[in-house]
Amino acid sequence: MLERIDHIICVVPDLGGASESYERLGLRLTAEERHAQTGSANRACFVGNSSDSAAYLELLSVFDPVMANATGRSHYVEAMASGGGLVGLGFGVSEIEGATAELSSAGFPAPVLSLSREDGSKVCDVAWVETGDALPYRISLIQYPEPWEQRYDRSRDLGRFAHSFPVKRLDHLAAVAPDIESACRFWSEVLGVPVHGEIRTPQLIIRQLKIGDAILELLGPAGPESPMANRPASLASMAAWEVTGRLDDAVALARECGFSPSDPEAGVIPGTRRSTIPAAELGGIGMQLLEYV
């Protein structure tokens, strides 16, 4: 059902300030787009070196809370009030009507809306899935009117991937799941995403769900004494991006740009090295830089 991670949504209280940080790092953003009908505005950062790996980070802010609340976007308003962070995931599909019919029959309504530009041209069909208590964050299904390869080529021709900072592709995201068995059943039985792999540490169970070219990690406690056992279910405000070339070079460049990434170290994922730029420096979402070795 879910073919790829199309985008991740990060609410930022100050869209201008967050955008400046990403641009200072060397990442190109789309122009600000204001949505009068929903009271929100956004900018996007596209990353990927092929049509299979392309995804984007959406920086979103609310300028009219009354309108946002009236159009079903109160979760954005609440996220703004609490300082922002990662609030939702959008998944690409090729047959949105069939996917939403399957979800509805399983008890999870997902009405399809068609979004268009001011000139009347179609942007996409989108369906927000009503997951109830199964997931504590928003997920949506997206179908574009053009094939993925054509969409990638168009975005590339528009210069959306022309970053000076060496991000290569979205590698993984994470979600805290204190009841990890229940969470895995929902993703597998309802959304059709089985467990792809598992990593265990003394405190942590990581179940890896492979969706297209990227991974969603479900983080659960290894035992009742684990700190994860007391954390509420939520998306972790972090995204891990594979870098092009050496991690040390990316870290040095980030520091030259005024950021404070951590010293490179061995990652939890076998065969990786990692460093993280703090969430406070990038609008509320940490940027983990990842190198496969």
Image (cartoon, rainbow, N blue to C red):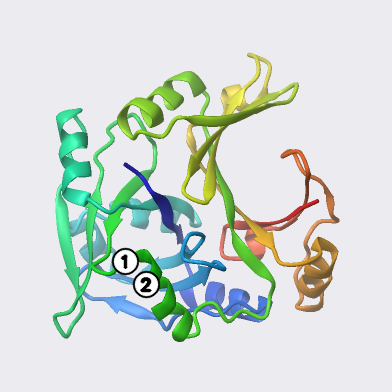
Separation of marks 2 and 1 at Cα, in angstroms: 6 Å
Percent coordinates x, y for residue 5 in the rendering: 44, 53
Q: Is residue 103 left or right of residue 286?
A: left
- Disc number for residue 147: 1
Q: Is residue 168 above or below residue 90?
A: below
Contact check, label 2 and label 1, Cβ < 8 Å: yes
Whether residue 238 appears in this view of the structure is: no
Helix, strand or loop at disc 1? loop
Tell me what residue is drawn at x 43 percent, y 77 percent: 153
Q: Nearer the viewer, residue 53 or 262?
A: 53
Q: Nearer the viewer, residue 107 or 23?
A: 107
Percent coordinates x, y for residue 13 in the rendering: 47, 66
Q: Specify the quadrant of the image occupied by residue 267.
A: top right
Q: Is residue 25 left or right of residue 121?
A: right
Q: Is residue 47 above or below residue 93?
A: below
Tell me what residue is drawn at x 21 percent, y 78 percent: 117
Helix, strand or loop at disc 2? helix
The amino acid pointed to by label 2 is: Arg
Percent coordinates x, y for residue 198 in the rendering: 62, 28
Position of the N terminus by quadrant: top left
Q: Is residue 77 left or right of residue 222?
A: left
Q: Is residue 292 above or below residue 147?
A: above
Whether residue 14 appears in this view of the structure is: yes
Q: Total label count? A: 2
**Badge 2, how many Cα within 10 Å: few under 14, some, many 20+?**
some
Q: Which residue is mark 2?
A: 151
